[in-house]
Amino acid sequence: MKWLKWVLVALLVALLLTGGLNPILEHLSDKNWLSQYLQHHGWTGHALVAIAAMLFVGLGGPRQAVAFMFGYIYGVTVGLVIAISVCLMAALGNYLAARVVFAHVLARRFPLRMHKFNQFASRAPFMKILTLRLLPVGSNLVTNLLSGSVGVPLTAFLGASVLGYFPQTLVFALVGGGINAANQSMIYLSVGLSLLSFVLTGLIYRDHLKHKLSKLNVESNL
């Protein structure tokens, strides 16, 4: 795994040294600038915008802004697919970087936070990561780094991320693409998924509390 560590470090250094993405990152929230940029650069421009958005989310930028931007550029359906793909790749990059490169550093700097997160995610990791994705609070970047550092199973991490990203990404892609441009079924789906996410979050949180209380009862009987 050492070679993978150095490959990741080299890619990180290359991204920091290159200036090709700087104009896109500076104008990532400017819809008009992006539209003109894509008209003049074709498929290369589309690829660079996707990479810039991935880097933006990977460094902690709000994924809702990316969903809005892609919804505006590509329309609701295509924008939704691209936005989720970009956010998922950014999350995977954070996860792998933490697991391969930064795990020991994070363990030394934030031992208490990592211990608490490991206790939280060790039981039913898929449902716990899904809860964090659905909650409209917290940091997407922190969740990615902690998940990689404590060794949350990759399949559970990616699966929960896709499902957890979907409701909010759909809502912001709808706003970016224009509510009037979307069919009614998609609007109803976004509202239904948003409501479902709150219900599911409440159920998962209740199960988590129940587990903690049962553990306390067991310990008190010892």
Image (cartoon, rainbow, N blue to C red):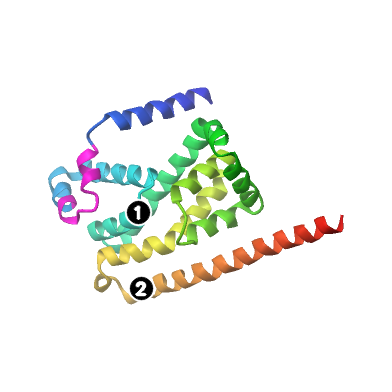
Answer whether residue 10 is magenta in the image.
no
User: Where does the C terminus fall, quadrant-wise?
Assistant: bottom right
- The amino acid type found where label 2 is placed reads Ile
Query: Which residue is disc 1 drawn over?
Result: 83
Residue type, mark 1 in image: Ala
Q: Quadrant of residue 15?
A: top left
Q: Which residue is mark 2?
A: 187
Q: Badge 2 local density, few (<14 within 10 Å), some, or many (20+)? A: some
SS category of the residue bearing label 2: helix
Judge whether 178 appears above or below 73 on screen: below
Q: Which residue is painted at 31% across and 56% down in the image? A: 65
**Magenta highlight: main SS:** helix
Residue 162: x, y in percent? 47, 55
Q: Is residue 102 visible?
A: yes
Q: Residues within 10 Å of mark 1 (few under 14, many from 20)?
A: many
> CA gap, disc 2 to disc 1?
18 Å
The quadrant where residue 174 appears: bottom left
In the picture, measured across the screen, residue 209 lies left or right of residue 101, that is right
Region of the chain picked out in magenta, as a range:
21-34
